[in-house]
Amino acid sequence: MTAARGRPLRGRARVPGDKSISHRALILGALTVGQTRISGLLEGEDVINTGKAMRALGARVTRTGSGSWQIEGVGVGGLAQPGELLDFGNSGTGCRLVMGAVAGCPIDATFDGDGSLRKRPMQRVLDPLTRIGAKAARVGEGGRLPIRLQGARDPIPIVYEPPVASAQLKSAVLLAGLGAPGTTTVFEKEATRDHTERMLSHFGADVTVETVGLGRRITVTGQPELAPAQVLVPADPSSAAFPMVAALVTPGSDIIIEAVMTNPLRTGLFDTLLEMGASIETLAVRRDGGEEIADLRVRGSSLKGVEVPAERAPSMIDEYPILAVAAAYADGITTMRGLKELRVKESDRLAATAAMLQVNGVEVAIDGDDLVVRGRGFVPGGGQVTTHMDHRIAMSALVLGQGADKPVQADDVSFVATSFPGFADLMRSLGADLA
Ligand code: S3P
């Protein structure tokens, strides 16, 4: 797909439901006795794969309308032995969280995924799950998929300190801890997205969260009977990031992105863009589904380079490729610090982001774990971006092209469907030139 400079973006748009919350709603719905109803579920491939996995593990998962799903759960400890391999496609979140859920049950399941997921580290999640009593009966080379996991017969509650800031790791341990008698504790040195904790409480689990410096200590009491709950999935701020930056870098644009979740553990990008001089107005702040949401008015803006501290990374971990696009259009240098984790996302996002800019005439450097972009207020463009099976690189490339002097091409946009079905149509409805 090719993106060319078009007219200013105008109008209103609503991006799909939050990916993190969608995965968790399906998993916790399956661990509940009774019927959970979900509305606004992200119907992207990643989440659909999690739904299929929960079905293979014994839950009844039914689509009742657009974004509306119903789950008849089996209860904590009630997951059934799957008759098939669990294929998570491109999704680290689905795979790692379901590993956690399986680890706390006496069943045996094989986890696999696509070429991208097979390259991503899984040992980090197997380590704590093994302490809880699960056994990795077969593991691909270097702690990679495919992995056969035998859940614990008698799960042991643990106290765990993740070695990296990762909501997936934290969540896997909390979900496994549901199967253990007593309390399981995760102490994270830096706070990461808290959707698992919030949703566990929403389903009636006994969860406590204590702030400790920049981090949090989270405790869950195991073997609860989770009560079915209704889940309203708010719009995904990580998806809103793409039309937002497109509007910022296209002079004369003025758009409203509706009902975006503004959970502070997810809004590092918005804070950074405001520091860069972006015109982003937060309108109609309200609550929905246990989260704060708002309409965001975004207007074309002159941006300036900024320094993004490493401590901000957990709150915008998926947003660096699109921030790098904004930085390319800014005046001056933007330094993004502490991006080691980007190397183990759907692609090596640090390398893929730098290559995306370089091939389009933007000066960029990787310095250790930092990304440094020298913005000149314009982007020459004209390059073909290799997306490496990574949805966020594909969408970032297409936004890059919307303000560039020459069109920008993304080599493969099929993975956009993992998180943002309808992306191209939504962008076109605002006025973008994507062909
Ligand atoms: C997610 C956590 C993050 C993020 C991913 C979604 C989640 O991964 O990159 O897109 O829903 O918990 P890590 O936990 O590996 O940082």
Image (spheres, helix red, strand yellow):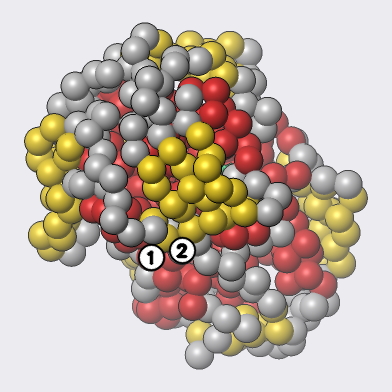
Amino acid type at mark 2: Gly
Residue in view at x 18 percent, y 64 percent: 66
Q: Which residue in the rendered view is the most extreme toward the front?
A: 137
The image position of residue 68, as x and y in percent, is: 16, 56
- Residue 238 is tagged as none
The crowd level at tag 2 (other Cα within 10 Å; few <14, some 14-19, many 20+) is many
Q: Is residue 160 visible?
A: yes
Residue in view at x 71 percent, y 59 percent: 348
The image position of residue 72, as x and y in percent, is: 12, 44
The crowd level at tag 1 (other Cα within 10 Å; few <14, some 14-19, many 20+) is many
**Residue occupied by mark 1:** 45
Front: mark 2 or 1: 2
Residue in view at x 64 percent, y 73 percent: 387
Q: Is residue 392 placed above or below 121 in the rendered structure?
A: below
Q: Is residue 297 visible?
A: no
The image position of residue 301, as x and y in percent, is: 61, 60
